[in-house]
Amino acid sequence: MAHLGVLATDWPYPAYVFWAGALAVLLSAASLAAFVGLQWGLDPVVCFIAVGLLGGALVYRLPALIESRSQQRLESHVGSMLRLLAVRLAFEPFEKALGAAALQPARPHPALSRLAQDLHRGLPPLSALHRLANASSSALVKKAAMQLSFCYRQGDATALSSLADEFSQIHASALQRFSGRTAFASVWFETSAALLPLLLSAYLLVGASFLRFTFAPAAPFWLLALVLPVANAALVGYVFLQAPEDG
């Protein structure tokens, strides 16, 4: 799986540590589902398998989500780097200006840190920019690397500001999409905090009175105290991974 390459950059531990932790969380969630299902009179094996399959699909997608967030962070930092570089090139050589602009964020992306290190070691700027383009799957980053290579060869930095504006527009669009996701998340939190307990109470009342529905006395507690918080935590994690990063 190619998208696991992000574990070598933003993930400070070996890949097997990630998978071991993910497997432990997955087994814990499936065991919790089996326990709650047993409290509600459901087949615990079916609950365990269902949650295990659903959680496995989410875990399989998690590295891709992490990589997407890493690429968004890199695009945001490259946009800021282009805008700063357009100013610094007026009074500094290209190599020095590019290296300083790449390290401008308080915590620069690892790809930009490697770019600055390559320039500091004396690697030709064209080679360093080529390595930057190959290290990223983002079309925007590759476009920026090509434009910087053209700027270095031709000595013309007029297009850097317009390219930085393009990065800013794309970042603004990502913020709008993220706003829609947070609106959905807020509706879900309001529903899970207020409406779901009321609907559950009505369901239990009707089921126990007319449908001869039986359940363990602690079943509502486990559902509201464990299942809903776990679902909310998963939603928070997903929304966090989709959040655009500032430059």
Image (cartoon, rainbow, N blue to C red):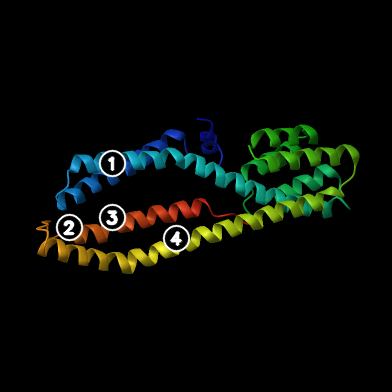
Task: Quarter of the image for the C terminus: give it.
Answer: bottom right
For marks 3 and 1, give the one nearer the viewer: 1
Cα distance between the residues tagged 2 and 3? 11 Å
Residue type at the position of mark 3: Val
Pointer 4: residues within 10 angstroms few (<14), some, or many (20+)? some
Of the image marks 2 and 4, the number of the one nearer the N terminus: 4
Q: Which residue lies furthest to the top in this view?
A: 1
Crowd band around label 3 with a 10 angstrom C-alpha radius: few (<14), some (14–19), many (20+): some
Mark 4 or 3 closer to N-term? 4
Q: Name the residue under label 4.
A: 185
CA gap between label 2 and label 4 equals 26 Å
> How far is the residue under mark 4 from the one under mark 3?
17 Å
The residue carrying mark 1 is 50
Give the numbered dot on residue 227. 3
> Which residue type carries mark 4?
Ala
Secondary structure type for disc 4? helix
> What is the secondary structure assignment of the residue under circle 1?
helix
Distance from Cα at disc 3 to Cα at disc 1 = 14 Å
> The disc labelled 2 sits on which kind of residue?
Ala
**Residue ID for mark 2:** 219
Seen in the picture, residue 20 relative to 211 is either above or below; the reply is: above
Image height of 134 relative to 215, above or below: above
